[in-house]
Image (cartoon, grey):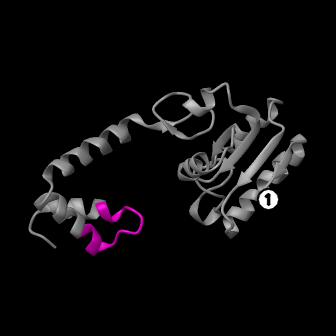
Amino acid sequence: MSDTNSLDVLIQALRRLPGVGQKTAQRMAFHLLERDRPAAISLSRALLAAAEGIKRCSRCRNLTELETCTLCSNTQRDASLLCVLESPSDLQAIESATGFRGHYFVLHGKLSPIDGLGPRELGFELLTQHLGEGVITELIVATNPTIEGEATAHFLRELCAAGGIRCTR
């Protein structure tokens, strides 16, 4: 440990990032402080602005600075198709790699009782409202092929069956 509390706090904060252990966090902190202070200041400002300004879209739960994101507001997209994803990064991957022109719904996780993630935490109430509007005719489930992802997909298929909506995986 260092003799500077701010440095310790920075290292511990960096360790919260996925895949970053103690040594990597230390290298990052030392690099920013020793070699690139302007980047450190820029990073801190960007993090603060994002943490204060970004929220979940009221319709699809994607990350946005707007009440309703630009994807949901786009009238050129096919409102009858809804793709359900685990994370905003999954949405970005599909948007950049495919020609999908429907809408999205971001769960921000997958069913995992051990982690305290149930239907309520994943926004299934909002999703059920969308399905009940009568516009969506096909739900595309794009959860990861893990045990939790498959359980989530099964739950979504049950929701579709109850509403008479075609569900594909």
Query: At numbered mark 1, what does the secondary structure look like: helix, strand or loop?
Result: helix
Q: Residue at x 23, y 44 (%)?
A: 42
Q: Quadrant of residue 19?
A: bottom left
Task: Pick the residue in front: 93 or 125.
Answer: 93
Residue type at the position of mark 1: His
Q: How many C-alpha atoms fall within 10 Å of the one at disc 1: few (<14), some, or many (≥20)?
A: some
Q: Residue at x 24, y 64 (%)?
A: 28
Q: Residue at x 77, y 51 (%)?
A: 156
Q: Which residues are magenta?
A: 14-26
The image position of residue 29, as x and y in percent, is: 20, 62
The image position of residue 18, as x and y in percent, is: 42, 64
Q: Is residue 146 magenta?
A: no
Determine which residue is flagged by label 1.
Answer: 154
Q: Where, quadrant-wise, is the N terminus in this rendering?
A: bottom left
How many numbered circles does the render carry? 1
The image position of residue 140, as x and y in percent, is: 76, 49
